[in-house]
Amino acid sequence: MKKHCLFIACLFLSLIVYAQGYDPSRVNKKAKALYDQAIERANDGAYPNAIALLQQCIALDKNYVDAYLSIAGVYAELKDHGQSVRYYEEAFAKDSSYTLDYKLPYSINVAALGQFEKALAAINDLLTKRPPRNPNSLKAAQYRQRCFAFAVDYAQKHPMGQYNFAPVNAGPAINTKESEYFPSLTIDQQELIFTRRLNGRNEDFFSSQKKEGEWTNAQPARGNVNTPDNEGAQNISQDGEWLVFTACNRTDGFGNCDLYISYRTAGGWSEAINLGGFINSDQWESQPCLSPDKKDLYFASRRPGGYGGIDIYVSHLRENGKWSEPENLGPEINTTGDEQCPFMHADNQTLYFTSNYWPGYGEDDIFLTRKKPGGGWTKALNLGYPINTIKHEGTLFVTADGKTAYYASDRSDSRGGLDIYSFELREDIRPVRTLWVKGKVSDKKTGKGLPSSIELTDLATRETVSHVQTDEQGNYLVTLPLGRDYSFTVNRRGYLFYSDQFLLRELAPDSTYRKDIPLQPLEVNANIVLKNIFFDVNKTELRPESQLELDKVVQLLKENPGLKIQIEGHTDNAGKPADNLQLSNNRAAAVVTYIKGKGIAPARLVAKGFGETRPVSDNGTEEGRARNRRTELKITSL
């Protein structure tokens, strides 16, 4: 966090004696001696002592304007902006001309209280009446003028309503007298991993688990990931299996700081592996973040060829397990300034990052951008005050519900240095609320875990939302942003694929947090329900969103040339039995017609309807009737 050495500034501003008003040469001599002592204490960092001496100066000489100005500067150092503003205003009241140059530090402290209109008026007063002669001071004043004008405009365009920014300290189980930062959580919010700086030097990873709603005492991350050197800027994958982070000046490095990855094992985190020469350059790479499906890696880099300063890049995990050449995220995000700290939310479309270039409140602000349909990003959007302030803002982590955010700050209730806090994110800057499904894919007969491919597809656009590979034991996690309808398919050679649907466009059902999937080996009489085959009521024409599922059937038949199948139609018991039988026959035939149209020999396909004769659930409820209205695939020959 930056320091505003405002008390020192007052020593170097011109001491102009005005014809009327305050005259420094006429200050009480005893007060002047105490003032010199106070400045020495302040320069040594003994701020409380400096304040006590300066207050004695004021007691001896109530018109000692320099003492008021200096005590205001010392309070600014202590981040007591209210007291700082109070003493500046007392000085201004005694001589508005002599103190005019101090409108710059005064305005900064006013802005720190969130009073941006008042801060803007003060800086405008300075620039109108007596612009600083020093080029650097003039530049600083003009910069603050732009920041305060932005803040006033933002407040007018984004009324906060009932929003209450009330960060909650994560407590003594997480925060200590050391600095804690870079919070990162698994998607179920049951594990928090963060960086702690030990003894003011060595950075290591610590983790805590949620037990009965409370965080356990954080312990050094298990395994071999921590070393005597620094490790930091980490991100844990949403499923908790990968840890990507930054390490500098290692013997296997490509540049001064590189990106590394560690994997969760039975004994803890594995020894770190350098992510290689595509990801890492001979420059600086840091602050990695994985997409929820672990297919994309976002990070910050100084590599040449960008827009200037630090840019944000993304690399994609290829089918061979190697990372692709990084791509610059483009001018909607990157600028000639520094863009850093990327965080991709579980919705896989909302990206948060920091920038010191885009219009904001000063220093680094936090922004968001969202993926556009078909590629590209929306223009960077400032998160606004009070999340962003006149100070440097750092990393932000937002949980899957899109409501709760975590960050690090040195607020007044910090236990020492930076602490980790959580707060409620304002509604208009939230990502899409995201549910998730995790579980294990296994062989239905043996129960053995199966490494498999899982695909989540938007039913409306037919675009693949995520393509996830389970681990070697068949474990998986898939995120489900609300507002869309999805098809969910699990594939593995030698097995019938599994399909399901998650209809989240109109209403968010209770989340299925765990779904274990037993895959059926390819064998005669093995069957599956094709859950993503859709017909309108009493109609036999396939709806367009059925194509995704049908193409999986075509793929299965092409991969297994000897396979023959029967497509079976079933209905509920509403209506006449004869009509239901005819409807089921026609629907099964429609499916077979589609498959034949994709080049599958007719001899491999049979269509058969069973009407209402084979219910799998109670027809007395709508839910039961919906389960009975189904299309099944059965293997008849291999």
Image (cartoon, rainbow, N blue to C red):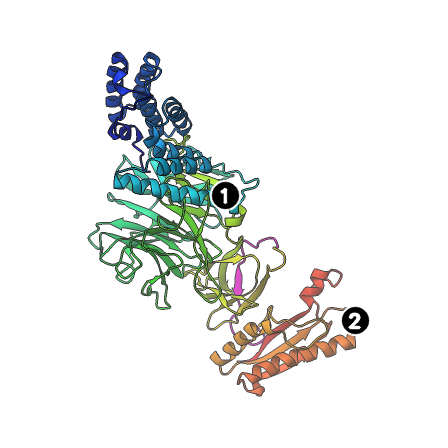
Q: Nearer the viewer, residue 594 or 62?
A: 62
In the displayed structure image, the side of residue 273 where residue 87 appears, left or right: right
Q: Is residue 100 magenta?
A: no
Please say if 584 is above or below 368.
below
In the displayed structure image, the side of residue 3 where residue 588 appears, left or right: right
x and y percentages locating residue 275 in the rendered image: 29, 58
Residue 191 visible in the picture: yes
The numbered mark, 1 or 2, whose residue comes first in the sequence reads: 1
State the quadrant of the N terminus: top left
The residue that label 1 is drawn on is: 155
Looking at the rendering, the stretch of residues picked out in magenta corresponds to: 509-526
Tell me the chief SS of the magenta region. Answer: loop
Q: Nearer the viewer, residue 289 or 22?
A: 22
Question: Secondary structure under badge 1?
Answer: helix
The residue that label 2 is drawn on is: 575
Which of labels 1 and 2 is toward the front? 1
x and y percentages locating residue 257 in the rendered image: 25, 51
- Determine the image quadrant of residue 208: top left
| Amino acid type of the residue tagged 1 in the rendering | Ala
